[in-house]
Amino acid sequence: MSRKPPGLASLTRHRLTSAQFSSHGSALRSTNAQAFETQLAVFRSLLQQFAQTHAKDIRSNPSFRAQFARMCAAIGVDPLLASSAKDGGGGSVWSQLLGGTVNDFYFELAVRVVEVCGRTRGENGGLIEVRKVREGLVAAGKGVGGEVTEDDILRAVATLKPLGSAYSVIRVGSKPYIRSVPKELNTDQSAVLEAVQVLGYVSVSMLMVNLRWARARAQTAVEDLLGEGMLWVDRQSEEAEFWSPGFMLESEEGGTG
Amino acid sequence: MGNTSSRVTAQDKAILDLKTQRDRLHQYQRRITVLTDRETAIARAMLAQNDKKRALLALRRKKYQETLLAKTDAQLAQLEQLTSNVEFALIQKDVVFGLQQGTRVLREIHAEMGGIEHVEKLMGDTADAIAYQREVNEMLAGQISNQDEDEVEDELAALEAEVNGGAKVQQPLPSVPDTQLPERREGLETPEREEPPAQAERREAMLA
Amino acid sequence: MSTTTPFFFPREYSFPPFFTRQTNLTTHHAQLIKWAALVLAYCRHHRLFKLSLSSAISDPLSSTAEPTSDTTASDLFHNRQLNRRLSLADAREVLDFLRRDGRVEPVDGTTGDVVWVYWRTPEEWAGLVEAWVDETAQRGGVLTLYELREGDATRGAEFHGMDADLLQKALGVLVKRGKAQIFGQEDSLGVKFF
């Protein structure tokens, strides 16, 4: 850029220069856009090559998958959603780039997640911690082709969005849960569930002490959750205890007889 | 189950009878081992007391039971042959007779099963026990072949060696012939024997 | 006939609320299903063919009692470690649930306290016996019920050592199908397979 000479004349020249620059800029930009498109095409084909060579790894290695997800996010593409029509192809970017391998992986995983949710809905009212889903998948024994992480589960659930709001991820405290029923939790109910996470169960007294609630409020909240099938009650203790059904999905063996 | 025509033939029924006898035998074989084990233990205990007479009695009793079982086993094997015969109708009478014989022997065995409590009587000193021992001796007389008798004596000798740790018994017993070596016996003797009460008590205690 | 390997209880057996009847209908249904599965698995492992509800529920005086043969199942409904037990009424409900499923049947001539637990139904047993008869080419031959249960030839077969009455029930299934006939005296029954 040339130095600006002082005075009105310089201002005029500057404007001209900017105009020149902007026209030049747009000329540049259109040139760059071409280059950019070319670069993207090259990048995609490299990615494709890489994917084909390492398809097995991508399928079995969770950090690889996470890496790809990040890379796609970096170029502004959501890997699991179907690409827009202008690309001409059907299916997600994953399936285009990777020949369907990883897409299949998440699709199968989503199916397994739905199975676990369905299987356990009777005992947990349709609310299940993602960690427990993972343990439920392990318990079901069907190899999903290597390790499955909680992130993978979350990504798989995301693919179910087009199915409507039936399956969604909610947070209780810091932990992610999958909800497969339309029932939404109010703040009190969420608070109770969060409290249950600590010991696996709560009593009305515990809620009163820890959350400083009146008895009626605590009672209502637990009874609501009980009514929704999201908690089980043990009445053989001194005070009734309300337990998270997730306990029954743990992978260690139970007591021997 | 009221079928008009039964598909079960007379041969089937005979086979069932045969197999039922064999099942009973199977059951007895299991249970009689309890008895014979006990009888062996009694014989051993008697030898430790230098009471060869009673040891011998226990072993004879055991031998008798074993021969009964062996006899029936042989009979059953024969019957099995007969019943599998295609010309069954012709030999049916033989089979029926054979089964009857078998039943008789089984009844004897069954009587032998009389009771484990009776087995203990082989050692006792009460009038009742002595009478029982005499009864058994009489019953066994003529029932045991010479060969069986030999085998019994061999078993006695073996047990003796076991009990005495190889050393021969030296001290003579009052009113009992001092026999070191097994002898062939034609008849059976049932001597009345006095035993010092202290020794009897000790024996009882041992078996408790 | 006891097994040497211990029974591995499912996870829910260590879950205290498992022993309290849940009020939510869906939860209760899920609970019943789990209890039913546990009863069948337990009886299958211990080769219990019958269950006496009253003895299973009552606490034996000797707290270290092992589950014996016959009908006692002292740790089925009672988790000593957890100090939780299923009530008599709730246990009965589990058995009723199994009954509707064809897996439990009251034993004839009893008050309903003693029941058959069909971790294998009479039909399933019949199938096993029939398979063995075919494997050993014994169709047309006569077998005593005793030898089917206790004979050396059937050692290793699933039905070896099974309950005598249940075996008769199973054979009854085959009789109804015209595949067998039972005959002989009460205490020495035989069966012929066609």
Image: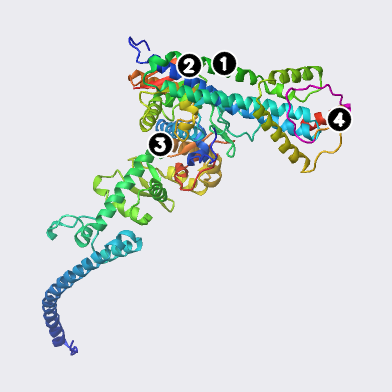
The secondary structure that dominates the magenta segment is loop
Display coloring: rainbow
**Which residue is the site of mark 4?**
B199
Which residue does the numbered mark 2 point to in the structure image? C108
Image position, residue A247 (x, y; %): 47, 44
Residues at marks 2 and 1 touching, judged by CB atoms closer than 8 Å: no
Nearer to us of marks 1 and 4 is 1
Q: Which residue is mark 1?
A: B104
Q: What subunit carries mark 4?
A: B
Splitting the image into 4 quarters, where does residue B42 fall?
top right
Q: Secondary structure at mark 1?
A: helix
Q: Quadrant of residue B136?
A: top right
Residue found at x 38% / y 40%: A120
Q: Residue at x 62, y 33 (%)?
A: C65
Give the residue type at disc 3: Glu
Q: Determine which of the numbered discs, if any, sits on residue C16 in the image.
A: none
The residues tagged by marks 2 and 4 sit, at their Cα atoms, a distance apart of 57 Å
First to last magenta residue range:
B180-199
The reply to whether the C-beta atoms of the residues labelled 3 and 2 are less than 8 Å apart is no
